[in-house]
Image (cartoon, helix red, strand yellow):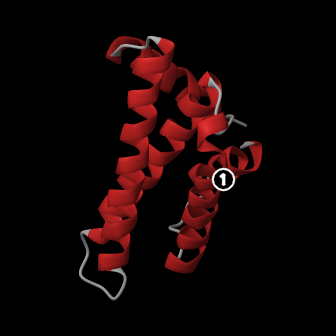
């Protein structure tokens, strides 16, 4: 999980857009992690993965809205990332007693941790 989170932090501090192959590779590493370990995720893992998935979904949606050779692939990534994010949200609410307000607060905390440090 730390490697996935660290890579996102690196991406968020970049001043240029990722090419599709690198974005897709990152997305695939997330899906592998979800498929292999989702049932074992702790509360914190779910919160972090939800944040990561939402970030991936937003970027995929934005890049998928352009008319180019990868737009359909970006749209698929956005749909699957949203599906997994919704699953994590559901599990947080059902198993850990979260409500929307508590999830939003956790997102803000993680967002603060992910922002690049000012030099």
- Side of 37 relative to 85 (left or right): right
Residue 2: where, in percent of width, then height?
Answer: 75, 42
On screen, 116 above or below 76? Answer: above
How many discs mark residues in the rendered view? 1
Foreground residue among 21 and 91: 91
Q: SS of the residue at dot 1?
A: helix
Residue to which mark 1 is pinned? 36
Q: Residue at x 46, y 54 (%)?
A: 56
Whether residue 85 is visible, yes or no, is yes
Foreground residue among 72 and 80: 80
Residue 53: where, in percent of width, then height?
Answer: 48, 47
Q: Residue at x 58, y 66 (%)?
A: 28
Can you tell which quarter of the image residue 76 is in?
bottom left
Q: Residue at x 24, y 81 (%)?
A: 67
Farthest-out residue, front: 39
Residue 9: where, in percent of width, then height?
Answer: 65, 46
- Side of 82 relative to 105 (left or right): left
Q: Residue at x 56, y 40 (%)?
A: 49
Residue 62: where, in percent of width, then height?
Answer: 31, 61
Task: Please rate how many residues cluster around mark 1, counting C-alpha atoms within 10 Å: few if below 14, some from 14 to 19, many from 20.
Answer: few
Foreground residue among 111 and 26: 26
């Amino acid at each position: 999980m730390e490697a996935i989170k660290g890579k996102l932090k690196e991406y968020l501090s970049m001043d240029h857009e990722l090419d599709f192959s690198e974005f897709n590779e990152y997305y695939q590493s997330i899906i592998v992690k979800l498929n292999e370990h989702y049932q074992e995720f702790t509360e914190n893992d779910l919160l972090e993965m939800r944040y990561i998935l939402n970030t991936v979904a937003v970027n995929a949606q934005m890049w998928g809205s352009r008319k180019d050779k990868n737009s359909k692939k970006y749209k698929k990534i956005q749909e699957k990332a949203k599906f997994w994010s919704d699953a994590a949200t559901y599990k947080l609410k059902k198993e850990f007693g979260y409500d929307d307000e508590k999830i939003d607060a956790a997102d803000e905390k993680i967002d603060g941790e992910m922002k690049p440090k000012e030099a």
